[in-house]
């Protein structure tokens, strides 16, 4: 019996390490979307958990301070990635929304699409100002290639938005 318990504890510890590594990886990835690493770490823990997690659970699992966890939970809830439930007078627990496609779509609309549209307008304005093949600062062929890259990025965002429900 003791041997079985020790094996379970070793396995649980290894599983916790693997989960923490996964949370770190999602945290690194989510930074690309403009969130902080802690957001990805928290979201991964909450999303993969079989039960609702409290701030104290997350503090323990991620080995970080409550001061780092609390504002991140508020931000994740505001973004619609997690929901909270009052467990008792002092404890809130958190669950992840299973369908995050709406959140991803909003991020694409609010940030990526705006950035790419701005870049497209600026490159178009620059192209208008270059009337001949000779410009003291700009290689016209490279400007055209840049314009093509921006058009491709716009197409990609439009495609993703069309696919996201």
Image (cartoon, rainbow, N blue to C red):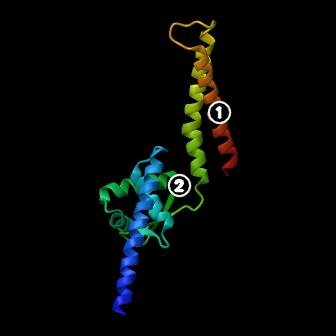
Q: Which mark is drawn over residue 10?
A: none
Q: Is residue 130 above or below residue 155?
A: above
Tell me what residue is drawn at x 47 percent, y 49 percent.
30
Residue 101 seen from this side:
yes
Tell me what residue is drawn at x 43 percent, y 68 percent.
53
Contact between marks 2 and 1 (CB within 8 A): the answer is no
Q: Which residue is mark 1?
A: 152
Quadrant of res 129: top right
Q: Which residue is mark 2?
A: 80
On the image, the x and y values in percent for residue 161 come to: 66, 44
Tell me what residue is drawn at x 41 percent, y 61 percent.
21
On the image, the x and y values in percent for residue 61 come to: 36, 66
In this view of the protein, which residue sits in the foreground, 91 or 35? 35
- Local packing at callout 1 (Cα closer than 10 Å; few below 14, some 14-19, many 20+) is few
Where disc 1 sits, the SS reads: helix
Task: Compare marks 2 and 1 and give the one earlier in the sequence.
Answer: 2
From the viewer's perspective, is 57 left or right of 100? left
Marks 2 and 1, how far apart at CA: 30 Å
In this view of the protein, which residue sits in the foreground, 157 or 102? 157
Where disc 2 sits, the SS reads: loop
């Amino acid at each position: 019996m003791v041997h079985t318990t020790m094996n379970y504890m070793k396995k649980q510890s290894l599983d916790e390490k693997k989960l923490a590594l996964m949370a770190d990886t999602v945290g690194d990835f989510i930074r690309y979307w403009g969130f902080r690493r802690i957001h990805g770490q928290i979201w991964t823990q909450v999303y993969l958990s079989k039960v609702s997690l409290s701030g104290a659970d997350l503090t323990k699992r991620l080995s970080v301070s409550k001061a780092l966890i609390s504002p991140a939970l508020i931000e994740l809830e505001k973004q619609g990635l997690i929901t909270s439930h009052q467990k008792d007078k002092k404890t809130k627990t958190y669950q992840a929304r299973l369908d995050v496609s709406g959140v991803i779509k909003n991020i694409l609309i609010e940030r990526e699409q705006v950035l790419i549209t701005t870049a497209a307008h600026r490159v178009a304005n620059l192209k208008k100002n270059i009337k001949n093949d000779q410009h003291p600062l700009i290689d016209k062929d490279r400007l055209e290639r840049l314009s093509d890259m921006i058009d491709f990025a716009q197409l990609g965002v439009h495609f993703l938005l069309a696919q996201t429900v």
